[in-house]
Amino acid sequence: MKVFLNVSREEQRVRLQERIDDPEKRWKFRKRDLDVRARFGEYIAAYEDVIEQTSSEHAPWHVVPATTTGSRPSRWRSCSSQRSSGSIRSCRSRRKGSKGS
């Protein structure tokens, strides 16, 4: 099973800000985090390429929104290169019409 935990740009911002603001999380912050954030679009484009090139009908990627630490499987997205596009942005819900989709 291939799973990609997809952190949105906004969620990344929130998490980095928490690391700066919260003394108990400050140890997690590294200056490099800001450099990585500045290249967010490049990273997403690379991830989309990997997912599109390595998904198949028999071994699809499952893209999980990682905005909270308790993402339920019903919110997973399944991507297959057999579809018109296997990118992060165009993944369909595995359980169409399920609660949380």
Image (cartoon, rainbow, N blue to C red):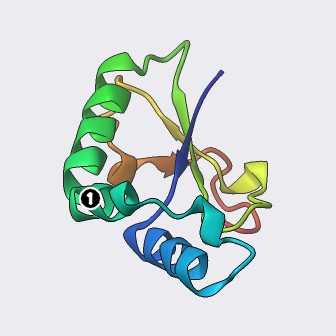
Q: Is residue 86 left or right of residue 14?
A: left
Q: Residue at x 43, y 47 (%)?
A: 91
* Up/down of 65 relative to 22, above or below: above
Dividing the image into 4 quarters, which one contains the N terminus? top right
Q: Secondary structure at mark 1?
A: helix
Q: Residue at x 48, y 49 (%)?
A: 92
Image coordinates for residue 27, horizontal then vertical, percent = 63, 64
Q: Using the rendered view, name the quadrant where residue 51 is placed.
A: top left
Image coordinates for residue 44, horizontal then vertical, percent = 30, 49
Q: Using the rendered view, name the quadrant where residue 94 is placed.
A: top right
* Up/down of 93 relative to 8, above or below: above
Q: How many marks?
A: 1
Does residue 85 show up? no
Image coordinates for residue 20, horizontal then vertical, percent = 53, 80
Mark 1 nearby-residue class (10 Å; few <14, some 14–19, many ≥20): few
Residue where numbered disc 1 is placed: 35
